[in-house]
Amino acid sequence: MKKVVYLMRHGETLFNTQKRVQGWSDSPLTENGIAQARSVADYFADKGIHFEAVYSSTQERATDTAKLVARIDKVTQLKGIKEMNFGSFEAQPEILLPKHRPNAKSFEDLLVPYGGEDILEVGKRVRQTLIDTMSHHDNLCLFVSHGAAMWGLIQLLKIEFPPNLRFSNCAILKWILTDEILTLTEVILPTEGFKVYPFKERSKE
């Protein structure tokens, strides 16, 4: 049975504007972030997309985004889709983060010695949380998560991205879940006027 899953990033936050690492730390949505989330609510409404259930990570910025997008007062929080732990770099300026290894597309395991997470382990918990949660639903659900957590899932599934495609605030990933296989079909970027990047490639799990 095919099920549709929307996985999206939270709206702009105070730390985003200050270029500080958030990770497991948190900061509130800015006025712009609130407006971004509301624009996504309008987008889904205009498309006639109605969710069977709405979930967020346990972090304030994701939960507040989910409430605004779904236009409801309460959502169910899931630890499995919370942001990557950046260890001792939490709340620090982004410029202090270690540089990627040559040709790497993520921090890989570079943050582990600093008390952080390996991005593939992040991807595994996000994937399992989506699969486990969707087992209780017939179809369409929304999950509001975080940029590195979403990128961890992309890295785990070895999905090739066009150069320079990044998860800006409120970026939306549309997936088809079939027999525990996640297939990415679209990346939608609200910050680019809801530009849609189609994907036809099956994940390489």
Image (cartoon, helix red, strand yellow):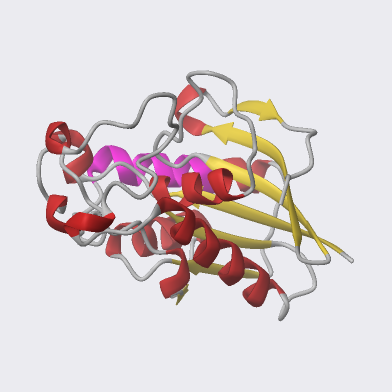
Indicate the position of residue 119 as horizontal and vertical percent values: 42, 52
Q: Main secondary structure of the magenta part?
A: helix
Tell which of 48 and 88 is nearer to you. 88
Q: Answer with left or right where residue 36 lies relative to residue 155.
A: left
Quadrant position of residue 195: top right
181 up-or-down from 133: above or below: above
Q: Is residue 177 magenta?
A: no
Query: Is there any visible trace of residue 146 in the rendered image?
Result: no
Q: Residue at x 40, y 38 (%)?
A: 106
Indicate the position of residue 9 as horizontal and vertical percent values: 44, 48
Q: Answer with left or right where residue 144 lies relative to residue 203.
A: left
Indicate the position of residue 203 as horizontal and vertical percent values: 73, 45
194 up-or-down from 144: above or below: above
Q: Quadrant of the N terminus?
A: bottom right
Tell which of 131 and 191 is nearer to you. 131
Q: Which residue is situated farthest in the bottom direction here?
A: 136
Q: Answer with left or right where residue 169 lies relative to residue 89.
A: right
139 up-or-down from 76: above or below: above
Q: Which residue is situated farthest in the right direction here?
A: 1
Quadrant position of residue 113: bottom left
Q: Residue at x 51, y 24 (%)?
A: 165
Indicate the position of residue 142 as horizontal and vertical percent values: 59, 60
Query: Is there any visible trace of residue 185 in the rendered image?
Result: yes
Q: Residue at x 62, y 35 (%)?
A: 187
Q: Residue at x 24, y 45 (%)?
A: 13
3 up-or-down from 98: above or below: below
For the image shown, how many numbered marks are present on the structure?
Answer: 0
Residue range corresponding to the magenta coloring: 30-42
